[in-house]
Amino acid sequence: MNIEPVAFFRSPLTSKFGVPRQSGVADKLPGRVELVPEYRSADAVRGLEAFSHAWLIWGFSANPHAPSGLTVRPPRLGGNERVGVFASRSPFRPNSLGLSSVRIESVEMTAAGPVINVLGADLMDGTPIYDIKPYVAYTDCHADARCGFVDSHHWEQLEVDVPAEVARLFSDDELSALRQLLAQDPRPRYHNDEERVYGMPYAGRDVKFRVEGRRVVVVGA
């Protein structure tokens, strides 16, 4: 089966470094789903505005190489313990497909066709989207679900310190989303150098930060 994108994603995150590891953890992060010409019709999204959330099926386009094995090392387990690829959300998968639940902020009709404005996506700018499906709570929500190693390994967010001279470079919404992104600690799990400065492309700027213990300190943008 050959599949082609029905849309492409637009995000303030232009690199995979800093992209949330799961959808919803940065629920203030905005994004836009822009349909390809073949589907730029109001008919394609008719009724979607009545749903609060949608599923996006998309491709890990920034991962050019195939998975090297059948096991992966999830960040939630510290990047050291291995689990099977099908017991993980790893981006390195046999078919390089991702699945994300996002909040629909609005369905906007533009001169270039319908645009779906969403919040909380874990996709970088330019990601191809292969399908869009409405989230339906009575089938998609499972209150009694067991979540394997996720249940037994709590993820603690970091404190984030953004100095005033950097904060004023962003709008209030951009700053709120940036704080959520940094609180998730975007570094690789095996990095633990408190002197190292990282750069994260975000909203047209290169946000510089370092991590001191459980605190993210932004040093420039």
Image: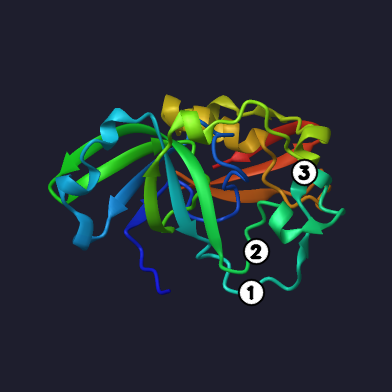
Label 1 vs label 3: CA separation?
Answer: 22 Å
Crowding at dot 3, Cα within 10 Å, few <14 / some 14-19 / many 20+, comes out as: some
Q: Within 10 Å of the Cα at label 1, are there few (<14), some (14-19), or many (20+) other Cα atoms?
A: few
Q: Using the rendered image of the protein, determine whether residue 28 is visible from the camera's viewpoint.
A: no
The residue sitting at 80% across, 36% down in the picture is 212
The circle on residue 206 is none
Q: Examine the rendered structure and indicate whether residue 74 appears above or below residue 143.
A: below
Q: Disc 3 marks which amino acid?
A: Arg
N-terminal label among 1 and 3: 1
Secondary-structure class at tag 2: loop
Name the residue beneath numbered marker 1: 66
Q: Which residue is mark 2?
A: 92
Mark count: 3
Which amino acid lies under the numbered mark 2 shown in the image of this protein?
Answer: Phe
Residue at position x 49%, y 36% in the image: 120
Quarter occupied by the C terminus: top right
Q: Name the residue beneath numbered marker 3.
A: 76
Question: Distance between the Cα atoms at labels 3 and 2?
Answer: 16 Å
For mark 3, give the secondary structure.
Answer: helix
Q: Looking at the image, which is closer to me, 121 or 203?
A: 121
Q: Nearer the viewer, residue 37 or 193?
A: 37
- Where's the N terminus, which quadrant? bottom left
